[in-house]
Image: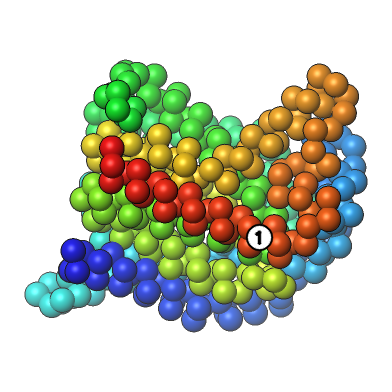
Amino acid sequence: MTNTLVTVLTPAIVAFVIGILITPLITHFLYKHKVWKKTGGKVAIGGHAATEFNRLKGINETRTPRMGGIVIWSSVLLTLGGLYALAYLFPTSILADLDFLSRSQTLIPAGALLIGALLGLLNDVYDVAHGGVGMRLSARLGIIVVLAGTLGWWFYDKLGVTAVNIPLDGAFELGILIVPFFIVLTLVLYASGVIDGIDGLSGGVFASVFAAYAGIAIVQDQIGLATFCAALVGGILAFLWFNIPPARFWMTETGTMALTLALAVVVFMTDSLGDGHGVALMFIVAFPLLATVASNILQLSYRKLTGKKLFRIAPLHHHFEAIGWSSEKVTMRYWIISIICAVIGVIVATSI
C-alpha cells in the first residue's frame, strides 16, 4: 500500500508544483491582454436580464480574467507527458514507476480532458472577443453530444461495456443503450460546470470529487486511473491557490468542460470496467454538482408551471448569496459538504 500511495500521490505533488510555477506566466498573459468580459452581466434563458445575477456578479465580470482553467489541465498534461518522457529516458530508474500513461486506464480520460480543454478555450476566446457572447448553448451541447456519443461507442464497441453495476443487485444490462446513457450522464455533468460562479467554489468541489474517485480507483486496483485523478487534484489545488477570494482568475469553460468530460469518463471507468459502482457512487461523491444541475431544472420547470421563481436565483449557490449569505460562507460550506460526500463515497466503495 505504501508503494501504491507513493505512485499515486507523487504525480499529484508534481502537478501542484507545476501549476504553481506556471500560474504567474498565465496570469501575466491574461491581465496583459485583458482577458475578461468588457460588459458585465448576462441574459436569462427567457431572454430577459438576469437581474439578481447582475446585481451580485455583474461588475466582477469586467474585472476578473477568464481562462484560469488553463492552469489545471496544462499542469496535469505536463505532468503526464513529463513523467512519461522521464520513464522513457530512464527505464530502469525509480522514475519509470511514476509513469501513469497507459492505453487501458489513462489515455481515454486524458484525451477527454484535452478535448474539453481546447473546446472550452475556444468558447472562452470567443466570449472575450465578442463582448461576453460565447458559443451558443445549442452549439456547445451539440458538440458535447457528439463527443459523448463517440466515447460511449468506444466503451460499447471497443471495451465491451454494456451494463451499469447496481449496488447489491448486480449488473443492469443496457446493451447498445449504454451509448445514449453515457451521453445523458456527460450532459448532466457538463451542466454542473455552472458551479464555477463564486471565488474558490468550483475548485474545492472538483478537488473533492476527483480525490474521491482516486480513492475508489485504488480500492478497485485501477492504479493508473487513480494516479490520473490524483494529478487532477494537484492541478486543481494549484488553481485554487490563486482562485480563493479575491480570485486572480476564474476557471470558465476551458476548465469546467475539461473537468466534466474527464469526470464522465472516470465515472464510467470505475463502474463495470473496474468491477465497481462508479455510476451509482457519483450520486454521493458528486452530490454538490448534481444539486447544482437539479436547482436549474427545478427553477425552469417551476417558472414554466407557475410563472414564478422557486429560488431567488439559480443555480443554488447564487440563491444562498441572494438571501444574504456571504460568498465565503457559501464556498466554505460547499467545501465541507463536498469533503463529507467524498469520504462517504470512498467508504461505500469499500463496502459494496
Q: Quadrant of the C terminus?
A: top left
* Location of the N terminus (image quadrant): bottom left
Q: Which x, y percent locates residue 134?
A: 72, 48
Judge whether 55 appears above or below 68 on screen: above
Residue occupying the point 61% across, 55% down: 334
Counting every numbered tag in the picture gives: 1
Residue that badge 1 annotates: 331
* Residue at the spot 63% in from the left edge and 69% down from the top edge: 243
Q: Quadrant of residue 239?
A: bottom right
The location of residue 26, given as percent across then percent down, is 59, 74
Q: Position of residue 349 (x, y in %)?
A: 32, 44
Crowding near the residue tagged with mark 1, few <14, some 14–19, many ≥20 C-alpha atoms within 10 Å: many
Q: Amino acid at mark 1?
A: Thr
Q: Residue at x 40, y 71 (%)?
A: 15
The answer to whether 228 appears left or right of 319 in the picture is: left
Residue 233: horizontal and vertical position, in percent?
Answer: 44, 63
Residue at (55%, 64%) from the top-left corner? 70
Relative to 167, does residue 85 appear above or below in the rendering?
Answer: below
Q: Is label 1 in a helix, a strand or a loop?
A: helix
Q: 203 or 148, which is in the foreground?
A: 203
Q: Quadrant of residue 158?
A: top left
Comparing 102 with 115, the one in front is 102
Residue 231 falls in image quadrant = bottom left
Taking depth in this image into account, of 347 and 8 the one nearest to the observer is 347
For the question of whether residue 113 can be seen, the reply is no
Colour mode of the rendering: rainbow
